[in-house]
Amino acid sequence: MIFTLETGYFIWNFSAWLRIFLLSAGAFCLLTYIIKRKTGGSLVNSKMTRGCDDRLEAGFFELKVSSFRAKVMQPWFDFPFSHILSIAVLFLLFAVALFSKSGVE
Amino acid sequence: MPLPVLSLLLPLAAAFLPLGFYIFKRIKCWHKYEKCVCEINLRFLKIFFLAVLTANLLLTWSVWTSMGTGGTEMFVLSSGGWSQTLSPDSPMLIKAVLQVDVFGAMSAFLMGCVALIAGLAAMADKNDTISLSKVSFFLTTLAGIQGIFYSGDLFSLLIFILVSQIGASGLFHGILTTKEELKELIWYYLSRSTALLMFLAGVVLLYYNYKTTNIAVLSTLIKLGTNEKIAYAFLVVPLFFMFVKSSSYVTDGSKRVFFAIRAQAALFVVFRIVFSLYGPLQGLEKIPNLFIMLGLILLVVSLVLTASERDPVKFAEAAELFMKGFLVISMGISISGTYAAQAAAEYGFGAIESMVALWILFLPVSATLSFVCCTLKHKTADGELWQQQGLFRVIPVSGVAFFFAVCVLAGLPPFVGFPSKQFLYRSSSYITPLLTIFLLIAALIMLLMSVRYISGVMFGKLSVSSENIKNHDVQVMVPLIILFIFLVYSTVTPSLFINSMVSPSVYSLFNKGQLVNAIHQGGATE
């Protein structure tokens, strides 16, 4: 059957995937329709977006990650010798993995 | 002359032609104390560049199709000319110039395709028009990488890595503008020189012990002692570094693609050393865990870099790092799965198939991301294109390609990235289920962040000023459509992708004894 492809490792059933996607799309459309009917045409209630800009604001977790990136990671990336340092660290890690006796039965 | 030799010599000779002309002009100007203006007919240069890339593609295609499934061929240059037959007298004295197997031939063809696509984009670029030096550096990189894919000898690998480094350095040097960048460039050259010297040290160590640098012969002779362990670190570390840190901040899409090609070639050398040369030797048991740990670090770093990133080029770099993380983890699991027959049957081969599939997809996906993200960096009246909203109406082809690339990258079914990720999830559960959960969560987070980024740029209300923006898709239309066709075709025919590209490559990567058997049979190949 053309909707089933066998790769030798698993069977790729296109019709099953199509059904899943169509079902998901149907559920998504239904949900959107119900919400829009309840809120009068808008997906998000206007009370919930009071004072918000059109653009998405960064969340708490995102701000923390950005701050970590800017304060901790970026200074290391900006060092001109970061490439040499990376090679040295990698070499050290490989040396430990190759010569360390601990953990070997 | 054998096809692989011709395929290797073509870009090399073609690279020297414009470079020689450029140097000749410079010397002539210097001799006359004039300011050098190297003018050349651009149309002629473009036709020449296109002809070389097309011929290279046809040659690599011919080499790949002539390989069959899993075969290996050796080409030796002797006093009697090129020969495909090796002397069975002494395998220790083999000086095979080229050794082509399915994995190398397929990689060279894939690289040839992507190089042609990058060349088309470079020729269409109106902001940074093509020049003599640019063409010669592109072709030098191409020749070096082609050599890497066709080499079966550590010393010839070193030579070709050096050639590709000259090409890549030339491409990198072109964007130098300030004193800080000069300082950065010096450190760049220093790090690359260190990497090459380390590789040379590894090759010399092995040659000193075994009097050969041929990978096939070495693999049958090697006994893991202190020297071999040091050589392992010297050979793997520089190439692993070149794979992870393949490029700097470059906003030229075609240059970024060539850097991605180079990253892929660096990992190819790592595969050759880890799987074909050393294999599962006693004493290397901790290496899989190290690769898994490094892969996890790359994944975490990529997720941190992607979070709230607005610059498209940095976003593309972080997404590439994400793919690299998955690749390194799959490599770690693959090595772990080769130590015992039971492990190989349970998860080893699945992990290796995943690794090769991820490796093949790395180049088309990163090329797509590079083209799209560099298009978003185009200047507009209000800054840059990515600072606008609702760009889907202005650059629809880039929008669709971006979404498709992200879905492949995250392994969303039914896109082509899914089979490779599915193999990996299944294999990683044998290491620890926690790893599988982490990989699934990482892929999901990446997908969500990427889709949010795409929707932020592509959808929304088009501002009044951006309504006058011209269609920037035009410059990358043909490259993106070709890449899109490849990704769509392999998505709808996953069996063809796995059976014709992945499985033969896995077979040739592991068939260590085949070459030596061929030598003893007087050059007979399977």
Image: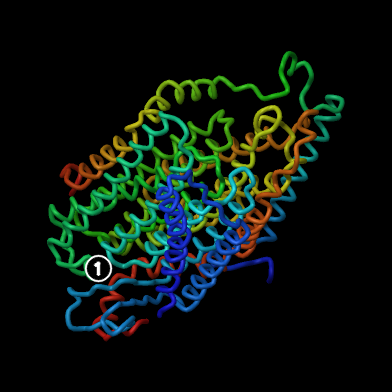
Q: Count all numbered tags in the image, as a single digit.
A: 1
Question: How crowded is the residue under tag 1: few (<14 C-alpha within 10 Å), some, or many (20+)?
Answer: many
Give the quarter of the figure containing the N terminus of chain B. bottom left
Residue type, mark 1 in image: Asn
Residue B301 horizontal/vertical position (percent): 44, 34
Residue B74 picture location, percent across and down? 33, 76
Position of A67 relative to B309 (above/below):
above
Q: Residue at x 25, y 45 (%)?
A: A94
In this rendering, is residue B50 above or below B330?
A: below
Of residue A79 and residue B423, the one placed in the foreground of this image is A79
Considering depth in this image, is A41 or B357 the residue closer to the camera? B357
Quadrant location of residue B179?
A: top left
Chain containing mark 1: B
B357 or A5, which is in the foreground? B357
Q: Is residue B152 above or below residue B234?
A: below
Which residue lies most toward the front here? B32
x and y, in percent, of residue B213 in the image: 22, 65
Can you identify the residue that label 1 sits on?
A: B214
